[in-house]
Image (tube, rainbow, N blue to C red):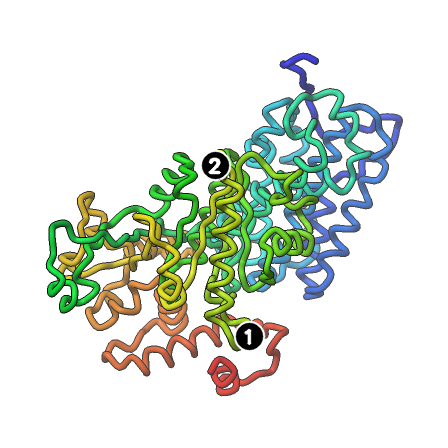
């Protein structure tokens, strides 16, 4: 098979005098009509109708038409998924005649685009040229429903990631339709066996997770994520007397060494030391642990060097045997067709990320014991898998208390990494060893700039009204900082009198009004604010 194989693909012309049914105009019209009618539950019907319209193309044997079928169906799924996920932003409804003209214009702009399908497409499907044209057309369609420019760009910017996931899903669901492409193109995608395809789907799903909208926003986590800093504890050098050890506070026996969290963990993965196979991320509620683990999993999946299995521990049922517990998780998750820890099916390298050790600890009355048993079972299995070479590395995240309760099991140097806030005051910096001056950067400024760009609210830094000493404790924490942004946007003001109770009450009100009162989340539809607060209590 030639290494330069490939062919040009354009929207199929009326071969055999058959009418063209794979039409973006009809897709945009159908989506628009559902939005105009307010029939919010009918997005699946739109997708099904658009995909059914391609049935005739499925009868074709020519690789060019089969490739178009694959691309079109994947694009339909991606676009419908994006619209459905942002349906609450489609406020103003145009009339149907205007929608018709818009869809004619959008379809015409896409008709003449030619594609070339070759090895590069399946290696880097995000680079497919038509995606840029579709993104532009999709942005125009969204703005027609009074979605602002920034929101429309943010939503359409997520199209490539959604498309890649839809591509893997479509290929996995209908392999018989695309058999001719396997013969024409020699790529890891087209020639992958069932197991490899399941990994490809799963890794595409990991990348999609960080693009999905946050709390009814147009943007996802990836658009506003700020790389986190952390520190590890290093014992103070020098000889110390027993009396010193007895009377000095535990924290004073250690130095706190600052590092960039992702850089540190990537170096750990790259080194692959079988004597250092487990890392632990520790942080308080809302410190960004789960956000980091999701981003890290997505980034490693995109690099494709080491397969990544991401396990939120609130979805995980621990047992006496880790292999059996992972097998059940994988089976319930539905992406992987095999347990990557099975002896006969194990991959040569694997990274497992267990997110939320404290969530595991909440299951049952003997919470601490469950977490300790889980940690020790992980250690036993990791040691067994790495008996001869590094096959398995594990990253565990958890709140400070549960990590501290298991600290006797984590004794390797730099094994526990403690997450730092967005901002550390000048006085507090004296408590750290920061040779790279990482703490000099106020990351709140970066977050607010990203948030301003993604939301269209034009912030280029932390607003002066919020840059107050008495608000530092809140704005320095990732989750609380985001809630502050919701409150500030909602009310255009924020309590700055230093009363934390008033501030938290303000945050709860803003979340309720922004996330539920207007849109009425179906889980608590009709719930009043006082009852909403009571539920949270």
Residue 26 x %, y %: 74, 46
Which of the image's four quarters has the N terminus? Answer: top right
Marking on residue 364: 1
Numbered disc 2: secondary structure = loop
Q: Quadrant of residue 120?
A: top right
Q: Is residue 530 left or right of residue 41?
A: left
Q: In this view, does 231 lie to the left or right of 405?
A: left
Which numbered disc, 1 or 2, marks the residue that appears first in the sequence? Answer: 1
Residue 79 in view (yes/no):
yes
Residue visible at 71% across and 57% down in the picture:
43
Numbered disc 1: secondary structure = loop
Q: Is residue 535 left or right of residue 187?
A: left
Residue visible at 49% across and 40% down in the picture:
386
Q: In which quarter of the image is residue 319?
A: bottom right
Q: Which of 413 and 101 is in front in this view?
A: 413
Residue 29 x %, y %: 71, 50
């Amino acid at each position: 098979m030639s290494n330069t194989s490939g062919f040009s693909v354009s929207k199929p012309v009326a071969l055999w005098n058959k009418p063209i049914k794979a039409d973006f105009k009809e897709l945009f019209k159908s989506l628009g009509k559902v939005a105009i009618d307010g029939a919010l539950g009918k997005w699946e019907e739109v997708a099904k109708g658009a995909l059914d319209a391609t049935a005739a193309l499925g009868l074709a044997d020519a690789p060019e038409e089969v490739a178009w079928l694959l691309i079109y169906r994947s694009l339909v799924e991606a676009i419908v998924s994006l619209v459905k996920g942002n349906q609450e932003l489609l406020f103003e409804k145009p009339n149907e005649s205007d929608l018709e003209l818009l869809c004619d214009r959008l379809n015409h702009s896409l008709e003449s685009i030619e594609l070339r399908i070759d090895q590069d497409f399946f290696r880097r499907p995000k680079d497919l040229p038509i995606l840029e044209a579709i993104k532009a057309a999709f942005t125009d369609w969204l703005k027609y429903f009074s979605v602002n420019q920034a929101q429309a760009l943010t939503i359409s910017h997520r199209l490539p990631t959604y498309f890649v996931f839809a591509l893997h899903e479509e290929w996995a669901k209908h392999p018989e339709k695309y058999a001719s492409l396997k013969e024409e193109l020699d790529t890891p995608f087209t020639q992958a066996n069932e197991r490899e395809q399941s990994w490809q789907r799963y890794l595409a799903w990991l990348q999609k997770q960080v693009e999905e909208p946050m709390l009814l926003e147009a943007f996802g986590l990836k658009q506003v994520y700020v790389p986190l800093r952390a520190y590890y504890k290093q014992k103070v050098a020098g000889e110390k007397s027993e009396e010193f050890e007895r009377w000095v506070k535990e924290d004073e026996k250690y130095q706190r060494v600052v590092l960039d969290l992702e850089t540190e963990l990537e170096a750990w993965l790259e080194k692959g030391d079988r004597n250092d196979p487990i890392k632990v991320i520790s942080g308080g509620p809302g410190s960004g642990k789960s956000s980091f683990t999701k981003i890290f999993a997505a980034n490693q999946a995109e690099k494709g060097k080491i397969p990544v299995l991401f396990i939120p521990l609130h979805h995980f049922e621990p047992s006496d045997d880790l292999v059996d517990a992972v097998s059940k998780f994988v089976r319930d998750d539905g992406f992987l067709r095999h347990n990557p820890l099975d002896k006969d099916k194990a991959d040569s390298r694997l990274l497992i990320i267990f997110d939320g050790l404290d969530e595991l600890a909440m299951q049952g009355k003997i919470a601490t014991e469950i977490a300790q048993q889980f940690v020790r079972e992980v250690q036993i299995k990791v040691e067994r898998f790495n008996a001869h070479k590094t096959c398995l590395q594990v990253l565990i995240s958890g709140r400070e208390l549960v990590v501290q309760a298991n600290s006797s099991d984590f004794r390797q140097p730099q094994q526990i990494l403690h997450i730092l806030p967005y901002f550390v005051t000048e006085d507090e910096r004296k408590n750290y060893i920061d040779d790279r001056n990482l703490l000099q950067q106020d990351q709140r400024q970066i977050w607010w700039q990203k948030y301003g760009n993604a939301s269209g609210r034009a912030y280029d830094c932390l607003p002066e009204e919020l840059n107050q000493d008495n608000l530092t404790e809140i704005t320095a924490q990732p989750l609380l900082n985001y809630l502050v942004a919701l409150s500030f946007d909602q009310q255009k003001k924020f309590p700055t009198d230093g009363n934390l109770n008033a501030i938290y009450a303000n945050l709860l009100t803003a979340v309720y009004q922004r996330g539920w009162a207007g849109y009425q989340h179906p889980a608590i539809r009709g719930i009043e604010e006082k009852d909403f607060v009571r539920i949270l209590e």
